[in-house]
Structure formats: C-alpha cells, structure tokens
Image: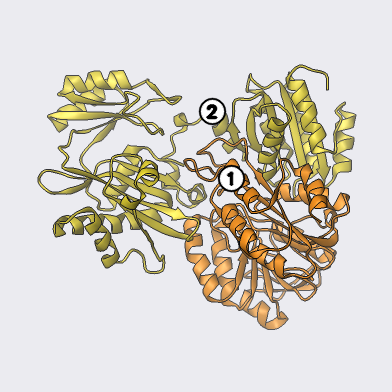
Chain colours: A yellow, B orange
C-alpha cells in the first residue's frame, strides 16, 4: 500500500525528522486559508500515487493566498496518469541550497534493509542508478543492531562536507530506519533531502510504501488507505478476499493460485487473446468467493468471455462448481464461459456443473483456446 | 535418493490442531510421512487422531519424539515466532506454509535460522514431496509419481499443473520443492539446483520462476557454471503489468527490473530450455534426456 506524500511527511515528523510545515486541503477555500496562515509564496502539490506530478501540471507555485486558491482549483479534480486529484498539499516554497536522496528498501538479494544515499537528489533514483550508479552509496543494515552511528555518519559525509550537516543527515537516516520498522514499510524515501541557505537539513518530499502483510497488525496505518486512489473493482475484490488486477483485454480470468493465474494470462496471450484481468480466488474453498469473483469479472464491460482455470489442491472442485452455479442464479453472465476444472473433487464438481448445463474441460490449453475464440465471437 | 526429505524424515507439525494443520496432517499421514509429533501450546498431552502425541513446545516434541523436520501451519501473526522456535529446538529442516508474514519479520528470522545451521523452506510455499517416500506440506500426493525429475518452483498450483503434465506423460519426480512466493525466503533456486545436481537419482530439473527479483537470473548463472544435468525452465507473468503485486508478495516488476522477458533471456543463455507455456515441459524434457 502506497501512502500519499502528506501522510509520509506526518510519519517522518512523528519520528523526529525535520520536515517543513505544510497542510493538506481538499477544497480551494481550505487551500487559501492554509496559504494565508503560512504566509509568503507557497507550493501547491497534487496528492496522487503517481510519479511525474510536476510535469503533469500537478505542482504549482503560488504567490499569496488568492493565488494558492486559484492553483488549488486548477489542480483539484485534475487527472494524473488516470488518477483524479482529491487532495493538495500546501507548503512554503523553500529556498533550496542543495538536493540529495536518502532511502531504505528491503533488499531481496542481501535479505536485509538497505540504506541508499545519493548526492544526486530531486530526480528518480532509478534514473540515477541507470545513468550515474557511482553516485549511489549503499549499506546493508544488520537488523539485530540497527543502523549504527558511525555507519550513518560515514554516509552523511558522502552528502555534505560540513560536519554539522553530515551529523544532521546521519541523524535523519537513523530515524528513518526506526520509522521503517515502526510502520512496517517496504520502502521509505526522502527525495529530496535538502539544505536551506541557512544550513539546515530537511526532508522536503517523502514516499513510503507499506508491506500489505503489516496492515492487519497496524490498524492505524491501514486506516491511511485512500480508497479513491484505487479502482473500485480492486477494492471490492480485496473486501471479498480475492486478489484482482484489472487489465485491458477481453478474456476475464478466474484462477486459483497466483502463479497459475499469471500462467493463464500468459497462455491467453500465447493463443492470440488478451486477458481482461488477473484474479486469484486463493487457496480456500468457499463458493461465495467464486460468486464475488464472477460479479467483479462481469462488471467489466470489456469482458467478452470468461475463463475458469482451476487446479484443485486445497481448493475443491465441487466448491468452485457450486459457486459458478449459484452466481448464475443470482445474475446473468451475459458472455460465454469456459471452465477448466481438475484436481481435488473434480468428479463432484463436474457433476454439479453438468446438472446446471455447463461443460467442464480437463486441459488448460484447450480451455484457453476456446475462451480466446469465444471472446473473438467465433464458435470454438 | 531424493533431496531434503525421504523415509528418514521425522516430522513435527506446528499448529496440528488448527483448521489447516489438522487437515494436512491427516493427508501427510495417509501419504506415509512419519508424523511423529504435533505442537499446539496448551494442548500438550493430547493425541492427534488417537495416534500422534501433541506437545506444548517444539523443544519437548524434539526431545520426546526425535523429530528432525518441522512444518508450520500457524496463522501469519505468529508464524515468525514459530520459525524462531523450531530453529531454537535443533530442527534441521523447517518448512513454513503460512502466507502473509511481514517481510521485515523475515529480515530477523533468516539470520537466526542460518546461525543455527537450519534450512528454512518458504514461507508462503506449498512445501515439498519426495514421491513414494515423504510429503511435507500441501502438494497433492495423487498427482506425483516417483521418478528422476527434480522440480523447484516459486508457485503452488502452477507447480501442480506442471507436475501433472510430467506424471501423466511418464516423467516421475525425485523431489518437488515449492520455495515460496515471498520476496525473502529461506531456500532459493540455487540451493535446490545444487541439491538436485548432487542427487544421483535426479536426471534433470524443471525450474518454475516468475516475475520479480533476480533469483532466476542468479540461478541461470549457477546452471551455466556448476551444473551438468539438463534444466528446463518456465517464467510466469509475461503479461503482468509493471509495479503491481501479482498475488504473490514477491511477484512485482520494479521499474524495468524483474520482467519475464529479462528472466527468460537469462535462462536461455545458460543452456536452459525455456518453456513458452506449461505444456512445453514434456517435449523439452524429451529433447534433453
């Protein structure tokens, strides 16, 4: 789960990292009041889960409260990379002497949290890694001891020659490391970390992603989720205990298991079709989940055929079949359905489907071929 | 022979009285796995299915029943703790089926397990099976057949699909290992490939990877420099969009790295025969054997 900039700034502030003032507004009048309180020139920034906000016109400077209100009116409601802007952050336009980067990610290769620091800040770190990798300093942190002071200071000196600034940066790094474990972040970035003309070091912009597996034990973090930033079908799927990702094709896929779900999408493409979605009904055997899955798939007007690919292990074929039959009693499918069902309780499942007038296939390739043909409006 | 588990495997089931643990303990016993103990704190002294002694702790279970392998079915909130406990009790092989362990917990678990000389398989995995000998986890025993193919995979049901293709076409398996779909796991492709290379009864290996991370690329390097046995590989997620977590916590394309295309190219340069679809596994193995 990604947090908005204003939410990430709040977390940093609570962990003692210096963050410039700033408040969030969802209406232009609120933006005006905040700008008035802050005084002087402010920056109005769109709060959406998308990079490149500046280029898209989602970040504007405003000289005074009326200008801030105008900027907020222009940005609120704007669409950036398919996402509608619901909130803006209003912060003082800081005078900046230098920009750098500090970030912590959980690194798969070293299996540790890795601190990354670069004097090339204010731009995407992936771009720095591609063009000038020598400008990035990395340290794998031993979670038993945490980020040690001398390690942080050594990295602080890669950013600043001045010992006071290097110490300030080191302190920020140690606090960021504590924040990562405190909120359950899989990524936490300060970009840019700036120095002001008076020499202070501050976190100007921040990005935090939370490991979804942390949310159950951290309700206060889970409450930060912005449902408006997600596709409604994906929200509905999560509530139903399904994993669903919408894609652009017309073959609606319903599969048990993430790996098989990906392989099914790939096979749809292999046979000349385009998958409409990734959907994993998970390992449990619950007919209601299948009903929810069909509701979500049929809610996509692009879907021209539905493909079930079930290889029963924990998932039982009779439960899936019951769910399909139940769903068709509750609402019309409107488009053809192709069912591949094998594994645990396949005999019982196929019998249930037959009684309701559905056929089931045993072979994955055959099922995918038929679904692709039906989506193209051909008789399979 | 086989890798990691065989007839000498003596299994303790952590969470044996829970919903998933009890169901799969019965399945493992029915398959012939030597389930020698169960653990559920507070239920020590009971017997599971009138046969398997239940203990309050893994340490007691090991002391009383000489278990050498543990399988974990406890909920995600206490799964990291269950791995710590197994490692502390002298268990050599720990298999964690549980999905949903926070990755930051795993940054603490993995060094702990490693320092105690134990091997962890998973978490978020289907476990492993040496057909005809022992099954630890949830892989359906009826789709497997004894034979000479080693299978290693990051997935669950996709692995069943490929095992099914193998078994129905006359290719039995020495051992099938599901290493798990999380970003931080105890046993990776290279560990399994090395074990299969050293196992005299394994003639060829099927590896099933997916998008996210660089484990498959490193495995390809290993195959190129260290393996003589033929390897056939598959990568799931060729149509996955970047930046989205595809069900498995570890299946995410970050920026331009971790794509299926990049991984398939890495496998191909290591003389690994790359499947375009699961059904290619049999013809490619026939070519290589």
Q: Give the percent coordinates (x, y) of residue B28.
A: 79, 63
Secondary structure of residue under mark 1: loop
Chain of the residue that carries numbered disc 1 in the rendered image: B
Chain of the residue that carries numbered disc 2 in the rendered image: A
Q: Could you say which disc has been placed on residue A232 in the image?
A: 2
Quarter occupied by residue A150: bottom left
At 55% across and 56% down in the image, what residue appears? B101
Mark 1 packing: few (<14 Cα in 10 Å), some, or many (20+)?
Answer: many
Q: Is residue B62 left or right of residue A184?
A: right
Q: Is residue B45 above or below residue A111?
A: below
At 66% across and 40% down in the image, what residue appears? A262
Q: Is residue B191 left or right of residue A368?
A: left
Which of these two is toward me, A334 or A198?
A198
Q: Which residue bears the numbered disc 1?
A: B211
Q: Give the percent coordinates (x, y) of residue A89.
A: 28, 32
Q: Give the percent coordinates (x, y) of residue A233.
A: 57, 29
Name the residue at the bottom extreme. Answer: B63
Q: Is residue A270 left or right of residue A63?
A: right
Q: Could you say which disc has been placed on residue A375 in the image?
A: none
Q: Is residue A202 above or below residue B9?
A: above
Q: Quadrant of the C terminus of chain B?
A: bottom right
Q: Is residue B9 visible?
A: yes
At 55% across and 47% down in the image, what residue appears? B212
């Amino acid at each position: 789960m990604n947090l908005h900039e204003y939410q990430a700034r709040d977390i940093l502030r609570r962990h003692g990292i210096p963050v410039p003032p700033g408040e969030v507004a969802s209406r232009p009048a609120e933006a005006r009041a905040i700008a008035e309180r802050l005084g002087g020139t402010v920056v109005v920034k769109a709060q959406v889960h998308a990079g490149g906000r500046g280029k898209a016109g989602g970040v504007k400077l405003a000289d005074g409260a009326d200008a801030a209100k105008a900027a907020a009116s222009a940005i609120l409601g704007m669409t950036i990379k398919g996402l509608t802007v619901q909130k803006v952050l209003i912060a003082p336009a800081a005078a900046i002497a230098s920009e750098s980067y500090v970030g912590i990610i959980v690194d798969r290769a070293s299996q540790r949290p890795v601190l990354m620091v670069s004097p090339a800040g204010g731009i995407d770190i992936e771009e720095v890694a591609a063009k000038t990798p020598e400008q990035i300093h990395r340290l794998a942190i031993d979670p038993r001891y945490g980020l040690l002071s001398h390690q942080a200071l050594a990295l602080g000196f890669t950013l600043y020659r001045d010992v006071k600034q290097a110490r300030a940066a080191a302190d920020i790094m140690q606090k960021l490391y504590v924040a990562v474990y405190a909120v359950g972040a899989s990524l936490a970035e300060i970009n840019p970390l700036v120095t002001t003309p008076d020499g202070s070091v501050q976190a100007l912009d921040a990005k935090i992603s939370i490991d979804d597996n942390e949310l159950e034990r951290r309700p206060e973090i889970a409450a930060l989720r912005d449902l408006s930033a997600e596709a409604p079908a994906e929200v509905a799927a999560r509530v139903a205990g399904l994993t669903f990702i919408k894609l652009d094709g017309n073959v609606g896929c319903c599969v048990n298991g993430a790996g098989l779900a990906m392989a099914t999408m790939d096979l749809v493409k292999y046979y000349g079709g385009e998958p409409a979605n990734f959907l994993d009904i998970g390992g449990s055997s619950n007919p209601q989940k299948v009903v929810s899955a069909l509701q979500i798939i049929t809610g996509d007007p692009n879907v021209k055929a539905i493909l079930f690919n079930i290889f029963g292990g924990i998932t039982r074929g009779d439960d899936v079949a019951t769910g399909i039959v139940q769903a068709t009693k509750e609402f019309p499918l409107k488009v053809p359905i192709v069912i591949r069902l094998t594994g645990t309780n396949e005999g019982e499942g196929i019998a249930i489907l037959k009684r309701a007038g559905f056929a089931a296939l045993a072979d994955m390739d055959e099922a995918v071929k038929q679904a692709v043909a039906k989506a193209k409006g051909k008789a399979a | 022979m086989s890798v990691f588990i065989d007839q000498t495997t003596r299994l303790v089931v952590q969470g044996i009285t829970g919903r998933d643990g009890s169901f799969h303990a019965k399945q493992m016993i029915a398959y012939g796995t030597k389930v020698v103990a169960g653990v559920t704190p507070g239920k020590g002294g009971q017997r599971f299915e009138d046969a398997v002694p239940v203990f309050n702790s893994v340490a007691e279970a090991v002391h009383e029943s000489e278990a050498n392998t543990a399988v974990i079915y406890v909920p995600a909130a206490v799964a990291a703790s269950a791995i710590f406990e197994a490692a502390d009790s002298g268990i050599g092989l720990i298999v964690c089926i549980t999905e949903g362990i926070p990755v930051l917990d795993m940054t603490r678990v993995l060094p702990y397990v490693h320092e105690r000389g134990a091997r962890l398989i998973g978490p978020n995995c289907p476990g492993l099976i040496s057909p005809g000998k022992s099954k630890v986890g949830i892989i359906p025993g009826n789709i497997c057949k004894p034979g000479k193919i080693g299978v290693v995979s990051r997935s669950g049901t996709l692995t069943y699909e490929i095992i099914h293709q193998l078994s129905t076409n006359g290719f039995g398996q020495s051992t099938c290992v599901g290493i798990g779909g999380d970003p931080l796991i105890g046993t990776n492709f290279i560990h399994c490939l090395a074990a299969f290379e050293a196992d005299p009864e394994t003639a060829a290996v099927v590896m099933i990877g997916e998008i996210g991370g660089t484990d498959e690329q490193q495995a390809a390097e290993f195959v190129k420099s260290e393996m003589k046995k033929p390897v056939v590989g598959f990568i799931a997620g060729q149509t996955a969009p970047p930046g989205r977590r595809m069900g498995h916590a570890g299946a995410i394309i970050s920026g331009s790295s971790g794509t299926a295309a990049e991984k398939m190219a890495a496998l191909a340069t290591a003389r690994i025969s790359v499947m375009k679809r699961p059904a290619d596994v049999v013809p490619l193995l026939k070519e290589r054997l």
